[in-house]
């Protein structure tokens, strides 16, 4: 496939002279000009340039409002800077052998190792500062304590960058990258992974979906930033113990975030793959489909983080009027939903049921309540339901991480699950 350049396809670009036309004597062909300051050369992946560029983007993000307090805004500025930096670099994800599922687990494992080593190094620095201060009767504390504080802050910053890199890599791996111009989707996933929203335990998830969908990125970022800063200080307070504690805590938090993001992007990819061939017919009945996803996700009594984030992302795509209407459908009584299923056109019923089957299989657990629900949906649609089909889909997700019939990353299309719905 020919590569595209700034002025169009490479095949249509010449050395400034139209094909088949002789160059005028006064304007002989010249070699391409060397890059100027306005057009810098692309940075080499092996050079320290990307790190410097990331710091530059971070300083620009933090400098937009010099009155912002660091302890409240540092994580917001970091996310904004990293997404801008990543979009500026436009470096494609390295393709490796193995299935999407295997490669996702490898990405998470590598991020956990980096985070754990960084935590151990921070713990060692804090321990060394404590020991030096004690052995010198406190006079060396003027240097040791600030050095330890810088180490703790550096660990917190680097760990956050590692986790952001892992998050974006997982999105690109499954073909559902996070939009650098709209970080709302990333904030929704992080809000659930870091538990920034409280909700009633007796609520099956209606209020949680609404809160996460309406969450402001700045508020979520401030809560996460404060939580990360508190954790970094606490795990480095106790000398010696803090070395192992910091490493273990970093591993666990990175693993939890990675697993949540991995499952979320797998949900998005699975639903898009399921509806790619019938996007037009399903798009016309998207509200009913989202309602069906709600009942599938809550059939076992609760919403997982990735399920809540998926519903919040779809829910947020509607205008205010449709949001209010859809929120009233997130209830325990499925009778109105089944009645709407019976009214669906015949051309929509097969892909509609297939999408719900995919939703039941994507977490690789098919519970009895989910099976009974799909049986009732199939009956309302006038179709036959086969549990064996769901188990086959589960085997595909277990083996490859994606549906086996999806041979490529599905291109985003408006209205499909994982994409915004035009108002």
Image (cartoon, rainbow, N blue to C red):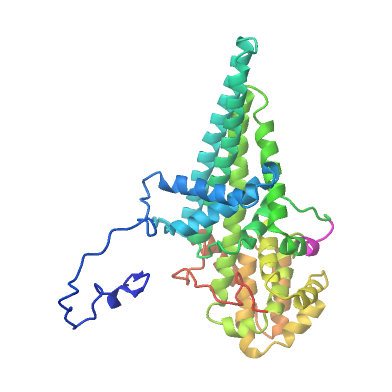
The answer, for residue 240, to whether it is visible in the render is no
Q: Residue at x 63, y 24 (%)?
A: 241
Residue sticking out furthest to the front: 26
Residue at left offset 57%, top offset 36%: 155
* Along the viewing direction, whichever of 226 and 357 lies nearer the viewer: 226
Please tell me whether residue 203 belongs to the stretch shown in magenta. Answer: yes
Q: Is residue 63 magenta?
A: no
Q: Quadrant of the C terminus?
A: bottom right
Image side of residue 277 versus residue 89, left or right: right
Q: Quadrant of residue 282?
A: bottom right
- Residue 74 spot, x, y in % from top left: 64, 45
Left-right relation of 143 to 16? right
Hey, which residue is sitting farthest left in the picture? 25
Look at 23% across and 77% down and name the residue there.
17
- Residue closer to the observer: 295 or 104: 104
User: Residue 341 in the image: x percent, y percent?
Assistant: 72, 83
Q: Is residue 319 above or below residue 368?
A: below
Q: What is the span of residues highlighted in magenta in the rendered image? A: 202-208
Q: Percent x, y for residue 137?
A: 64, 9
Q: Residue at x 83, y 60 (%)?
A: 203
């Amino acid at each position: 496939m020919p590569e595209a350049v700034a002025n169009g396809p490479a095949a249509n670009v010449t050395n400034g002279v139209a094909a088949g036309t002789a160059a005028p004597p006064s304007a002989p062909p010249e070699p391409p000009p060397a890059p100027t300051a306005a057009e810098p050369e692309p940075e080499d992946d092996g050079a320290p340039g990307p790190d410097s560029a990331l710091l530059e983007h971070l300083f620009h993000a933090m400098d937009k409002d010099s009155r912002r307090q660091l302890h409240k805004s540092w994580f917001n500025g970091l996310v904004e800077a990293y997404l801008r930096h990543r979009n500026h670099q436009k470096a494609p994800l390295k393709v490796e052998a193995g299935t999407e599922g295997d490669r996702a687990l490898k990405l998470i494992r590598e991020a956990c190792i980096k985070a754990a080593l960084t935590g151990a190094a921070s713990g060692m620095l804090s321990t060394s500062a404590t020991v030096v201060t004690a052995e010198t009767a406190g006079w060396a504390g003027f240097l040791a304590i600030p050095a330890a504080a810088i180490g703790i802050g550096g660990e917190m910053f680097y760990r956050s960058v590692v986790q952001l890199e892992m998050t974006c890599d997982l999105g690109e791996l499954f073909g559902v990258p996070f939009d650098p111009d709209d970080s709302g989707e990333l904030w929704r996933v992080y809000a659930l992974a870091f538990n920034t929203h409280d909700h009633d335990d007796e609520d099956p998830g209606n209020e949680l979906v609404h809160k996460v969908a309406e969450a402001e990125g700045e508020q979520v970022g401030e809560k996460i930033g404060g939580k990360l800063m508190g954790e970094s200080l606490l795990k480095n307070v106790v000398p010696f113990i803090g070395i192992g504690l910091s490493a273990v805590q970093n591993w666990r938090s990175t693993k939890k975030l990675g697993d949540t993001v991995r499952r979320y992007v797998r949900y998005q990819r699975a639903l898009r793959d399921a509806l790619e061939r019938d996007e037009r017919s399903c798009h016309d009945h998207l509200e009913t489909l989202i309602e069906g996803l709600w009942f599938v996700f809550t059939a076992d009594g609760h919403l997982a983080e990735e399920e809540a984030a998926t519903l919040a992302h779809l829910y947020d795509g509607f205008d205010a009027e449709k949001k209010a209407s859809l929120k009233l459908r997130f209830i325990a009584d499925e009778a109105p939903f089944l009645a709407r299923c019976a009214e669906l056109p015949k051309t929509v019923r097969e892909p509609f049921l297939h999408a719900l089957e995919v939703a039941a299989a994507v977490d690789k657990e098919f519970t009895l309540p989910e099976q009974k629900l799909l049986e009732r949906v199939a009956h309302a649609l006038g179709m036959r339901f086969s549990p064996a089909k769901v188990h086959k889909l589960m085997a595909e997700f277990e083996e490859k991480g994606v549906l086996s019939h999806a041979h490529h990353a599905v291109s985003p299309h408006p209205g499909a699950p994982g994409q915004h719905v035009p108002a």
